Image (tube, helix red, strand yellow):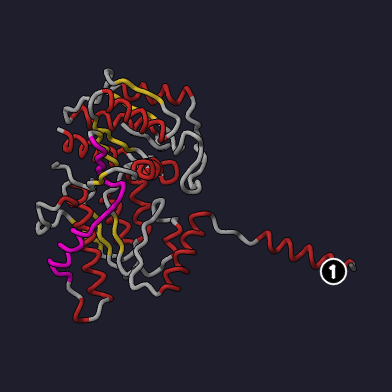
C-alpha cells in the first residue's frame, strides 16, 4: 500500500468520525418518519418526549396544528426549575402559520405560552372543558381526561377543517361519542380486578399527575413506585393527595424498574441506568418523605416489580382483600401490566363497581 493510499484512508476515516450519529430519541423519530411515509398514513400524531424547543420531533417545520396539555413540573434538569422555563420549551413546537391550542394553564405558564405565540405569529387558543361531553362516559370520569378530550376535539376539528375533503370537514357529535367509546389507554386510570385484589394503575410521573392519580384512587376506593424525577417530592404529593381525600394507606411498597425477581424482562431494556442507584440512603430519603405526611403507614422495600406485586398480593390474601395504587413511572406500569395480565379481569377507567 502506497503512502498516498494510506493518507486517503486516514482522511476517509476522519471524515466518517466527524459525521454525527443520531441519539436514541432522534433515531426513533427518524425511523417513525420513514415508517409513516412508507406505509402512507393519512395522519401522524407526534408527542414530544422532552419539552419541545429542542425535542427531536421539533424537526417538523410545518405541523398542521399543535397542542399543549396542562403543564407541570417535569424534566426540570433539562428544561429548568420553574413552570415558566418549562412553558418556554413547550411553546417551541409553535410554528408560524400553524394554529395552536392549549388547555387552561396557571397564569405564569399561560403568559409565557402567549408571549411565544405572539413572537412566532401563531394564533393560540386556550381550551376549557367542552360542555357537550357526555357526563356518563367511563373514560371521562377523571376530570383530567375531560380536559384532555376537550383539547383533542379542538385539534381534530382543526385538522379536518384544513386537510379533510370538503364533505368530511365537520367532526360530528356522533364521531366524538364513538371516539370516546373506543378510547383505550392501558396504564392510564387503569383498573384490574383479580378476585378480591384490585389494582389501580396509572403511569403518572410528575408532581401534578401523581396528585391526579391519587385523587382518582381516592374517588375509586371511598402505594406504588416513584421515578427518578425527585422521587421524594412525588411521594409527598401522593401522600398529601391521599391524606386530603381522607384515605389512610396501610402499606406503602417502594420498588425499582427491575421487572422480575430473577432479573429477566419481557422486553429489552430501553431506559437508562438510574443516575442514583436505589441505595440505602435513597430508600431512607423516600421513607422519610412519605412519613413526613403519613407517619402511620407501614413502608416496605422490594427491589423488583414482581416482588412488590407479590408482597401486595400476600397482604391482600392475609387481610381478605386489598386495593392497591401503582403509580410513579411508565416503566413500572409497563412491567406491572405484563405481570398482572394473566388470569385477571381488566376494568379500564371504571370507578363505579
* Residue drawn at point x = 29 percent, y = 65 percent: 122
Q: Range of the magenta residues? A: 171-195
Can residue 177 be found in the magenta stretch? yes
Secondary structure of the residue carrying tag 1 is helix
Query: Alpha-carbon neighbours of circle 1 within 10 Å: few (<14), some, or many (≥20)?
Result: few
Residue drawn at (37%, 46%), measured in percent from left and top?
85
Please tell me whether residue 102 is drawn above or below residue 199 in the rendered image: below
In the rendered image, is residue 337 in sight?
yes
**Which residue is drawn at the image coordinates 24% and 80% (left, top)?**
165
Asked whether 188 falls inside the magenta stretch, the response is yes
**Up-down relation of residue 74 to residue 253 (above or below):** below
Q: Quadrant of the N terminus?
A: bottom right
Please state which of residues 117 and 68 is positioned toward the viewer in this rendering: 68
User: Outermost residue, right direction?
Assistant: 2
Q: Could you say where residue 3 lies in the image, as x and y percent from the top left?
A: 89, 66
Which image quarter: residue 7? bottom right
Q: Which residue is mark 1?
A: 5
Q: Nearer the viewer, residue 181 or 75?
A: 181
Quadrant in the picture for the C terminus: top left
- Does 237 sit left or right of 79 as displayed? left
| In the depicted structure, whether residue 338 falls above or below residue 183 | above
Q: Is residue 300 above or below residue 341?
A: above
In the image, residue 193 lies at what x, y percent? 24, 40
- Report the side of 244 relative to 327 (left or right): left
Residue 32: x and y in percent read 45, 64
Q: Tell which of 267 and 295 is nearer to you.
A: 267
Q: Is residue 17 left or right of residue 59?
A: right
Kindly identify the residue that appears in the image at 23 percent across and 60 percent down: 152
Q: Is residue 3 left or right of residue 140?
A: right
Position in image of residue 218 (x %, y %): 19, 34
Amino acid at each position: 500500500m502506497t503512502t498516498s493510499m494510506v493518507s486517503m484512508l486516514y482522511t476517509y476515516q476522519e471524515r466518517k468520525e466527524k459525521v454525527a450519529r443520531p441519539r436514541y430519541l432522534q433515531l426513533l423519530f427518524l425511523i417513525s418518519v420513514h415508517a409513516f411515509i412508507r406505509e402512507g398514513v393519512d395522519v401522524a400524531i407526534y408527542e414530544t418526549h422532552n419539552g419541545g424547543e429542542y425535542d427531536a420531533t421539533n424537526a417538523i417545520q410545518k405541523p398542521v396544528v399543535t397542542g399543549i396539555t396542562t403543564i407541570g413540573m417535569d424534566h426540570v434538569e433539562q428544561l429548568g426549575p420553574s413552570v415558566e422555563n418549562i412553558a418556554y420549551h413547550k411553546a417551541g413546537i409553535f410554528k408560524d402559520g400553524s394554529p395552536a391550542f392549549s388547555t387552561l394553564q396557571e397564569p405564569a405558564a399561560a403568559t409565557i405560552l402567549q408571549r411565544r405565540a405572539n413572537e412566532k405569529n401563531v394564533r393560540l387558543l386556550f381550551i376549557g372543558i367542552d360542555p357537550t361531553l357526555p357526563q356518563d362516559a367511563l373514560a371521562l370520569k377523571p376530570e383530567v381526561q375531560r380536559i384532555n378530550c376537550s383539547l383533542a376535539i379542538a385539534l381534530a376539528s382543526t385538522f379536518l377543517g384544513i386537510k379533510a375533503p370538503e364533505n368530511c370537514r365537520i367532526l360530528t357529535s356522533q364521531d366524538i361519542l364513538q371516539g370516546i367509546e373506543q378510547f383505550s389507554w392501558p396504564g392510564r386510570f387503569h383498573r384490574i380486578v383479580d378476585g378480591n385484589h384490585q389494582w389501580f394503575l396509572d403511569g403518572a410521573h410528575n408532581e401534578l399527575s401523581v396528585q391526579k392519580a391519587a385523587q382518582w384512587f381516592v374517588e375509586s376506593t371511598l402505594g406504588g413506585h416513584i421515578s427518578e424525577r425527585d422521587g421524594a417530592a412525588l411521594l409527598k404529593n401522593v401522600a398529601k393527595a391521599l391524606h386530603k381525600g381522607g384515605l389512610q394507606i396501610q402499606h406503602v411498597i417502594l420498588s425499582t424498574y427491575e421487572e422480575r425477581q430473577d432479573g429477566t424482562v419481557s422486553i429489552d431494556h430501553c431506559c437508562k441506568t438510574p443516575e442514583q442507584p436505589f441505595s440505602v440512603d435513597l430508600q431512607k430519603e423516600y421513607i422519610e418523605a412519605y412519613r413526613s405526611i403519613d407517619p402511620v403507614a407501614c413502608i416496605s422495600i422490594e427491589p423488583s416489580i414482581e416482588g412488590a406485586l407479590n408482597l401486595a398480593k400476600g397482604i391482600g390474601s392475609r387481610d381478605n382483600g386489598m386495593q392497591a395504587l401503582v403509580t410513579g413511572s411508565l416503566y413500572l406500569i409497563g412491567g406491572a401490566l405484563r405481570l398482572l395480565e394473566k388470569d385477571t379481569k381488566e376494568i379500564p377507567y371504571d370507578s363505579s363497581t
